[in-house]
Image (cartoon, coloured by chain):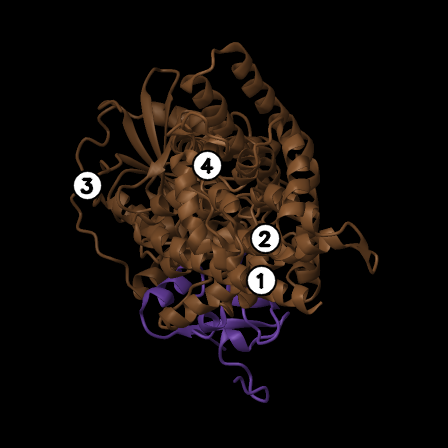
Amino acid sequence: MNAADLRIALVGLPNCGKTALFNRMTGSRQKVANYPGVTVERKEGYYKSASGRRYRLLDLPGTYGLTPTTLDEAITRDVALGRLTSEPRPETIVLVADATHLPLSLRLALEVKRIGLPMIVVLNMTDLARKRGYTIDCDRLSKELGTPVIETVAVARGGADALISHLDSLPSDFSATPPTTEWREPSAEDVQQTHAEAARILTASGYREPARSEFIAAADRVLLHPFFGLLVLGTLLFFVFQAVFSWAALPMDLIDAGMVSLAEWVRGSMPDGPLRSLLADGIIAGVGSVIIFLPQIIILFAFILALEDSGYLPRAAYLLDRMMGSVGLSGRAFIPLLSSFACAIPGIMATRTIPSLRDRLATIMVAPLMTCSARLPVYALLIAAFIPDRDVGGFSLQGMVLFALYFAGVAGALLVAWVLKKFRGNSDTHLLMLELPDYQWPRFGNLAFGLWERARLFLARAGGIILALMVVLWFLSTYPAPPAGATGPAIEYSFAGQLGQALAVVLAPIGFNWQISIALIPGLAAREVAVGALGTVYALSGDEDVVSTALSTVIASQWSLATGLALLAWYVFAPQCLATLAVVKRETNSWRYPLIMTVYLFGLAYLAAFATYRIALWFSVGG
Amino acid sequence: MTDLTQPPTTLSGLRAGQSAVVDRIDADDVLARRLLEIGFFPGASVELVASMWPAHDPVAVRVGGATFALRRQEAERVKIR
């Protein structure tokens, strides 16, 4: 940051196109982090105008007023008032108003104006508003408001040029004196008064309200219908899941093959030694285990972003609010939980949109129970080994078991959420108060930008953690080296092996042998790594496909059915993913929640595996 | 429960397609202010777009050119006439 940069804060209603304007102005020169001590996302960006002046833009969380109901909204107020010690007070505020929806935006403008900072009002989405018959006299509006008024179309190329050149025309010392006015929190009376004032100004400026599209009204009659709405949502979800799993298969295979041949190449071209092993088995395998999920995450997020852009997602939250509310979750938890089916990490990061801290924590706590795609290789291996490949009533038995495992995860999540609700009582008032914005066609540029951002965040945040953990676990599974003349596989003598053998004592009651116990340890880095580790323990070599085919034969002959089923049950619940726990730690800013999560998930996993093992044993003895 | 023989007195008593005018929001807490901020001020006209089964919770309400989803306890705070 440069002292001479003009500090601008963007303030506006949720869905006003503020972030699109921010992206339009700053492009890729953005920095996304958290405000210190809280998990509110801080989005900052820079740009340099044609005249050479530099601007620093802060995209503040959207809000309807300066009386906060969420952590995010409190940040908006505190930054605008200069109350945050970590954040220099902005020198000017750009208030982004949605032109299709002016009354609420103008009311907010009047409230923000009272803070006393220089302000520019931007009328955004004017293209859409004009199409629906909106008119306004900007000069008159500017006179009435006492601030400059500028029209933008943030989603169009060049749509922010008017704002950029206006900012450039400001004298460099125009906000040299900080405001001295005393600010007080608006009362209900003040809110009503600003509404009345906004209405008066709009009338004086010749405002004609854009007509409501008949199409939107008709669409909402179906999509918000208690029956047809849920039917459409269910169909949509089914389609999204189909797409995530079928479209991602090819790129995932390609990445997998690429990583395997890269590791082979390293093995072939380097002398044997710890460095080669670290590169091939630690780093390449680690990076590979992260980016293999990128195709699924990108496809899932493409759908989520398109649905979000179109205005449908809040409607899904509306439809599910009652159902999710009965177990103590908010309808807003729907999006994070949906993301968690690809990977819990972006899901947990997406819980930031949930206003109530308790609702948010409950969502974070159950997110790892959604069957993420890292469980699939483990499920696939065990199902292939133990579940006969035959049809029952026209459906594949293996497919039904897979579905049952997904279902067990969801049922477990509902149960846990319900228990959490009982624990915390019902003292909290939960706000839904969700705006259902007008439907729009998703814009490709927006989608591409959003996807790129998510992919980057996922790789940066998850990648770093997983990579570090992989290196640590590689060390634990490689050292100490087996003594001379050892007969078993090398991993048996390593720290991980010793740990696994100690664990086997604890895990014996749920039917796990020491080989499984050892494989669970490297499997902590990422669930699917357990498959490779089992291969190592059973001293199999070759590429992953060969290993897992050979492995399923080996374990089918050496494990009992009860053990196989118990391991499946274990994987439904076990927090076999340190990266998820690390993200929970960061998102909640404490060790408390990742610890609780670890304990309760291992507890559930143990119970589920124990019950499965005993019941299966009883049946196989009885039958 | 809402008595169906009487005209509804709060937003949560409206049925899909029905309109009304906001009378008042009692008390001055965060919830009241937020409801006011999003447009439920005295004199504003509202239309119920949809409500979920089984207990009309949540509801979708059209107010001042926008649509909001409100839970029952939120909708009950808005007195109508």
Instruction: Give residue A89's position: percent from left, percent from top.
Output: 23, 38
Q: Nearer the viewer, residue A357 or A433?
A: A357
- Residue to which mark 4 is pinned: A492
> Helix, strand or loop at disc 4?
helix
> Which label's residue is closer to the chain start, 1 or 3?
3
What tint does the image give chain B? purple
Chain letter of disc 4 in the image: A
Q: State yes or no: discs 3 and 4 in contact (Cβ < 8 Å).
A: no
| Distance CA(mark 4)–CA(mark 1) | 27 Å
Chain letter of disc 1 in the image: A
> Which label's residue is closer to the chain start, 2 or 4?
4
| Distance CA(mark 1)–CA(mark 2) | 9 Å
Residue A140 figure quarter: top left
Q: Are the residues flagged by discs 1 and 3 from a single subunit? A: yes
Instruction: Give residue A452's position: percent from left, percent from top.
Output: 52, 30
Look at discs 4 and 1 and give the one toward the viewer.
Answer: 4
| Distance CA(mark 2)–CA(mark 4) | 23 Å
Q: Nearer the viewer, residue A239 or A372?
A: A372
- Residue to which mark 1 is pinned: A612
Q: State yes or no: discs 1 and 2 in contact (Cβ < 8 Å).
A: yes
| Distance CA(mark 3)–CA(mark 4) | 54 Å
Instruction: Give residue A622's position: percent from left, percent from top.
Output: 68, 69
A415 up-or-down from A130: above or below: below
